[in-house]
Structure formats: C-alpha cells, structure tokens
Amino acid sequence: MYKSLLCLRYLRTRYIALASIISMTLGVATMIVVNSVMDGFSTDMRTRLRGILADVIVETNSLDGEPVTKDIRNSIQRAVGDDIAGMTTTVEIYAMLSVQYGSQWQSKPVTLIGIDPATKATVGPLAQYLEHTKDNDIPNWELSPEAMAYRKEWTTRAQWMVDRWNHNPPPMEENEQVSFEEPVESNEPLPVPKFASDSKTASPFDQAPKPEATQKTNSTVNPFSNDLKASAFEKKEEQDPSSPLKGRVYIGYGLVSFPYEDPETGKTEMFQIVKPGDDVKISTVTAGQPPEPTHFNATVVDLFKSNMSEHDSSLVFCNLEYLQEMRSMIDPTSGEKAITSIQIKLKHPEDAAMVVSKLEEALPAGLFRVRTWEDKQGPLLAAVEVESAILNVLLFLIIAVAGFGILAIFFMITIEKTRDIGVLKALGASSNGIMSIFLSYGLALGLVGSGVGVIVGLLFVRYINEIEKAITWITGRKVFDQRIYYFPEISTHVNPMMVFWVAIGAMVIAVLASILPARKAARFHPVESLRYE
Amino acid sequence: MTETLSMPHPQLAAVAIEKAYRKDKHKVPVLRGIDVEVQKGEFLSIVGQSGSGKSTLMHLFGLLDSPDIGEIHLEGQRIDDLPDHARDQIRNRVFGFIFQFYHLLPELNLLENVLSPLMIRYSTWEYWKRKKQFRQDALEIIEKVGLSHRIKHRPSEMSGGEMQRAAIARALIAKPQILLADEPTGNLDSSTGKEIMDLLTSLNEQEQLTIIMVTHDNSIAAQAHRTVRLLEGQIEVLGKSHAASVPA
C-alpha cells in the first residue's frame, strides 16, 4: 500500500524525473510518426502500384508479343479460371511522346500501354485515375462533350489560318507570329502554322506530307501507314475535320504539366500544356525483326493522374487495337492480335503466389513470364521496408538513451531519499518493498512518458500536413516537395499494433533503467540511512 | 542485572553485546560487552556522551543493526539472528521508533505518516478493507498527541514539537510493545521538550508501554525509572535506586 502511495507522491513532487522522460516521450512520438509515415507511404504505394498493375501479370518475354490463341485462353481458364475476377490484355512498349507547346516540340520517353479500357477497368481502378471520367463510368475512348467542343474550336481556327494563309500569305518579314522552318510558296500545301500566342496548336503535319494529306489539314494520321488504311481514314476525315483521330490516348498528368509559380500571388500552380481534345505525336517501334520506327498522331481523350508521380510522368495509355495495328502486331492471315501482357485480378489477392505457380505450369514455357505485382515491384517495396527497419532501430536507440537518463536521475533520487528509505525500514518495510517503490516509480514514469509520447505522436500524424505547411512557411523551404516524392501530400497509416509495441518497449526500458537504482536503494543499511543527512 | 534474575524473562535483553564499526581500514569498537535487561512497563533511559554507543545500542535493540558478538532477546527468544523478513515484522509490530529529527516522510501528510506502519504491515487489499478502522484509530491517536488540527498538513508545515508528536503518533499506531526513542527532545526547546516528555511519561504510566529512551541530557533522563549510563562502550553506573519502582 505504502509503495503505490509513495510512488504516486514521488511522481507528483519530483518534476526532475518528469524531465528525464521527455526524451522518452520524444522517442516514442518520433517512432510513431516515422512508422506511420513510412507505413502510409508503402501502403499508398502498394495500392497505387497495384492499381496500375494487377494481382498477377503474365508477360511475354519478347516485346513483339505473342498472339493470345484459343489454346492459351483455354489453359488459363482451366488452370485458374475459378480464381479470376477480371482479366485484360495489354501491349506495353517504350515510346517517345511529342507534344507541341508554343512553337516548340517537346519529346519525352514514355511507357506506352495499349489497353482496352472496359476490361482494364475490371482489373484495377482505372476510372478513378482519369481526370475527366467519373468514378462510376466505364472508361472508354470517346471524347467528352467539353473536349469535343474544345477540339472543334481549335481545329476551326487552325483551318481558318490555313485557308487565310493559302489565299493571302503575309509578307515574311511582318509575319513574326508564324514560325516556319523555311519559306514556302503560297500555292504549295502548307503545314499547320504554329502560333506562338496559342499554345494549343493543331496536330501538325509531318514535314513531308503526302499530297492527299494536304487537304485534310490538321488531322492527318501517320502518313507512313499503308495506303489502304490511310484512304479509309481519309473518308472519315473529310466528313468532319474536327472529329478525333483514330489513335486515342490517356496521358499521364506529369508528362504534360509542370509547376509554375505565379509571380503575383507567389503560389505554385500546375500549368497544363495539353488538354483533352488536343493531338499529340507518338513514336515507337514495330514488332518483328528488326524493329522499325513508326509514329502516329493521337487525340488526347483524358489525363491520367494516379498521384504516383513516377507513373504520372511516364505512362501513356493508348487504344489497344490501334497500337497493335500501328506496331503490325496483327497477323494478316489469321487476324490474330499479339499482346505483351495479360493482367489478372484475383478474387482472393492473397492466393497470388499459388495462381502464379499454376499459371507457370499451364502456359508454354519460354514464352511467358508470370509474376505477381509485388514481384514486379519487388526492389522498390523492399527498399521501403529496409529503410523503415533501419529507422526503427535508430529511433529505438533514442528511447534507449532516454533509459540512461532515467537511470541517472533515479540514482539521484534514491540518494536524496536515503533517509526516508531508512525510516521505512525502521517502520518494518522489507527490502523488496523498497525496491518495488522505485520499480513502480520507473514503470509509472514509463507509462507517463510513453502515454504522452503516443498522444503527441498520434496528434502529429493526424496534423502532419498542416505541420508540414507551417514548417515550410517558417523556414521558407519546402519540406515535402511533391515533385520529388511520389505523392501529392504526406500520407500516413497508423498501425495500432505498432503503437502498442512502441509504448510497451518504452515502458520496459524505463523499468529496466530503474532496476539498478531500486536495488541499490533496497540494499541501504537502515542505520546508515537514518544517519544520512 | 542481578535484581532481575528472579524474573522468568525480561521483556527485552541485550546479552554481552559487542559492536564495532569499520572506518576505512580501522575497526572502531563502539560497544564492548553490554548487558541490559528491560522489564515490561519500564521506562529506561540510556545516557552517555556523544560516541558512547547509546544510539548504537538502541539500534541493536530495534533490530536496525546486528551485534558482532552477543544476542538480543525478546521475551526470552533470541531475535537478532532471525531472517530479514522476520526482523522486518518484529520492527513493524513490536517496536515503535521515535527519532531526534522526527524522520517523517516529507511527501505524506500527517495522517498518512501516522498510518504508514499499517500500510507497511498490510497488503493493499487488506488495508483497503480495514481502511475505515485504521483511519479511526489514527485519528484517535492524533487526538491524543494533540494534533487533530493538523491531519492534512505536510511535515514541512509543522513545528518541531508537532513533528515529534506526529512521530510519536506514528510509533503508537501499530500498538507496539516497546517504544524506542532516540533523543526525542534533542532538537526541541525546553518547554516543547517537556511536553514531549510528559506525553511519553503518561504513555508509560497509563498504557504500561515499555520505553527505552536515549538521551544525553541528565535532567531528561531523570524522568525515567532507571538510567543506564554508557562510557566508551561499557556500562558505567547502573540505574539509581528508583529502579526499584519498576512495576512487576
């Protein structure tokens, strides 16, 4: 009884001991914050990686792809048909994306993925990532009415410019707004002028347009594609010059936007150089040996924003069939279309490993590689895990250091309390009783220290983005730069078990640190203690 | 010593006690062969100069220390060689201690200080069960020592005389058989000292409480039934004739 009473009184009267546990509080809070942020980071990254990929991915070893024959479909169905919740086929290839901004062309390396939006949406949350598609809609390649109106507007203006140019070319020296690479004669077919004042320019002509393409003004597609297709395309073009091209793409948001600081307000805003309805140019290679360069124009249908900056600044989704056509992946005799990967969503994602091994057996060896999305992103996920483990070790050392602080202060307190210990012994308290006073004092300090630490840590996690803004405002330096990290804001995930173990760990350290002083106190000789002044 | 031989057992006895302290490498003898017997209800004073070993003798009586040679007997039973937990219990139940510097626990108020021997004796559960009774007892004892107006006060808020009364109340709460007082008036002015002595005398007379008091003040010692005078670790003169008035 006296033990808990004295322990409580010491807690209330010895503020120096409370100071000693501040480092413990900070250690606990930091551990909770760091773990929550790392956990949030990896959880978010996992969801997003998985959103882009699927539970299981079957890839061809060759970029040329393999036709998905009936046999392959059947063997997949037979092997894992019951586990499949959704499946889609894609063509994945490296490509260059060229976008015109002002009078300048910008080319960027991208990963071009040919998809069928409707089936792709069954394996991952594609619609969520599309800026102008509602979450519930099944994504498709149709332009939205706004995009259509926008397209109509700029194509009309471009057409008007071309017409005007053709009829009454301005003298070159006055024509500062128009930038041609070389002077052209007025009766020659003309490329679409590029307007410095208008960033949204028309789909450009290629430098050497074929004669028939000259009538189509801006919407020419791939002059190198075979004549049959080109003429089939022309008919459509003639009906309406503003109708979208056959190639349609979703472009990663990061590819066509950049941060821009408004000189008046000082705020950083994202400046977007391409809108749905614009045209872009894509260059890639054909299937077959050797790969031949090929390029085509495509109309932007939507912007893709997964909030994972690596994906947003490298992925371009294109309509699968058109890509297969452009890359000559369609067998001219059988009409079979080759693909480079099959993405499978499982009914039970935790069975992924089992499904992978079943598929490996079922599919012809050497042609396909079957992996889970985690295997595919292994190094990235492993890096995050290693980082988090090392940080945990380091932060736990902070708590251990706090333990030494408690040890030192406890020694001080036992010396200060020497006489009282003598009195207690004279009154009949046992050595174990004396020891347990100080042990429970240590435990109580640990409880307070880690309790406050948990509260501080959780509050910090809760308001981490506000705190980040405040620190940014105070220091004038951006703490969390969205351009560097994967996410637009710091995401956190609090794991209750982690909080529990951190708190327990801190308490154990506090108790361990008080064992030595408590034993020393218990061994005090009563007579000497009573004499102690 | 011879006069007690006829008794079956003295209540408390020191038999041929020797005790030395080690100071660095030197052995400093403090007690060199002491024999004292204390009868039930006796008020014994031990006097001597500083360093004569009187406090050490009292500590040995109270089992706060063990003799190098010799034995301590309680009701004829040897108690100085008992295991620690048994000695703790005897200290708690048999003896009540009063110190020169009161030695109240500064974190506890008067009532809690007085109750502390009971808190030490009983487990938390048992203490809570009988808390009301204990509190009642404590209040009675506090009233007896005249501190009812101070029960919520901390030692630092009390005067020396009040603290010593509180210490006496603490020593009495466990209903001890023997009160061991080490210079109970040593830190008090003479009038306050007299009050404390009156209190001790009345306890001795009214409740037949055995009191062993250490003091260096002859006038204080004279209020006891018998005086044992220590000189350099040995008994110099036995108590005066008033020892005869010891109640049987």
Image: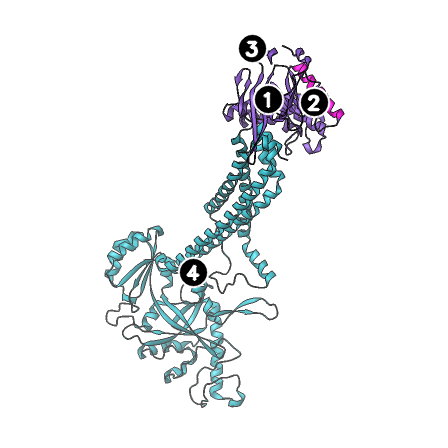
Chain colours: A cyan, B purple
Looking at the rendered structure, whether the residues under marks 2 and 3 are on a common chain is answered as yes
* Label annotation for residue A127: 4
Dot 3: what SS?
loop
Q: Nearer the viewer, mark 1 or mark 3?
A: 3
Amino acid identity at mark 1 = Phe
Q: Nearer the viewer, mark 2 or mark 3?
A: 3
Q: Quadrant of residue B101?
A: top right
Per the model, the C-alpha gap separating discs 1 and 2 is 18 Å
Dot 2: what SS?
loop
* Label annotation for residue B95: 1
Q: Nearer the viewer, mark 2 or mark 4?
A: 2
Q: Which residues are magenta?
A: B190-207
Dot 3 falls on which chain? B
Task: Determine the residue located farthest toward the top in the rendered image.
Answer: B6
* Label annotation for residue B8: 3
- Where's residue A88, x and y in %? 33, 61
Q: Residues within 10 Å of mark 2 (few under 14, many from 20)?
A: some
Dot 4 falls on which chain? A
Which residue bears the numbered disc 2? B145
Dot 1: what SS?
strand
Per the model, the C-alpha gap separating discs 2 and 3 is 34 Å
